[in-house]
Image (tube, helix red, strand yellow):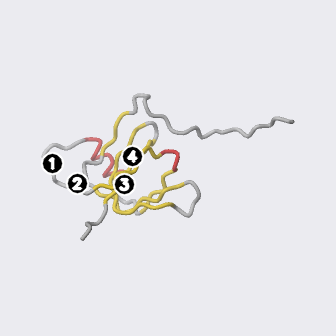
Amino acid sequence: MKTKSVYKIIFIQLGEIYEVFAKQIYQSDMYGFIEVEEYIFNKDKQLVVDPSSEKLKNEFAKVDRSYIPINSIIRIDEVNETGEAKIKENKGQVRPFPLNIQPSNSKE
């Protein structure tokens, strides 16, 4: 019998790289977004408290569902076990897909 899936979602938010775990993820009815529900945070499993993990717990504490733009997502993995949610500093190595695409006004 297959165990229930857990998803690791890595995305860019305000110049930082977020790595979170959730039980539910699917394409949104809102075009261009992924819906993430049932965030998982490891509570009291570590003696050392990671400040970025605590920041994420506080940020998503009362969130029922998130809508993440597809162009912000770096990777989604289906995993067997959860890890520690964290925020990594983006050292300029990862950039989001360009958002300000201008329509061409060329006349042929």
Q: x, y percentage for residue 61?
A: 34, 57
Q: For label 2, count other residues whose C-alpha is less than 10 Å away and answer few (under 14), some (14-19) or many (20+).
A: few
Q: Earlier in the sequence, mark 3 or mark 1?
A: 1
Q: What residue type is disc 1 on?
A: Gln
| Displayed quadrant of residue 97 | top right
Q: x, y percentage for residue 90?
A: 40, 33
Horizontal placement of 61 versus 93: left or right? left
| Numbered mark located on residue 42 in the image | 2
Q: For label 3, count other residues whose C-alpha is less than 10 Å away and answer few (under 14), some (14-19) or many (20+).
A: some
Contact? badges 1 and 4 (CB < 8 Å): no
Q: x, y percentage for residue 69?
A: 52, 50
Q: What residue type is disc 4 on?
A: Ile
Q: Nearer the viewer, mark 2 or mark 3?
A: 2
Q: Secondary structure at mark 4?
A: strand
Which quarter of the figure is the N terminus placed in? bottom left
Q: Secondary structure at mark 1?
A: loop
| Numbered mark located on residue 10 in the image | 4
Q: Nearer the viewer, mark 4 or mark 3?
A: 4
| Closer to us: 59 or 74 | 74
Q: Residue furthest right?
A: 108
Which residue does the numbered mark 3 point to in the structure image?
60
Q: What residue type is disc 3 on?
A: Phe
Q: Nearer the viewer, mark 3 or mark 1?
A: 1
Horizontal placement of 94 versus 87: left or right? right
Contact? badges 1 and 2 (CB < 8 Å): yes
Q: Earlier in the sequence, mark 4 or mark 3?
A: 4
Q: CA distance from mark 4 to mark 3?
A: 15 Å
Q: x, y percentage for residue 24?
A: 38, 63
Contact? badges 2 and 3 (CB < 8 Å): no
Q: Nearer the viewer, mark 2 or mark 4?
A: 4
Which residue does the numbered mark 1 point to in the structure image?
46
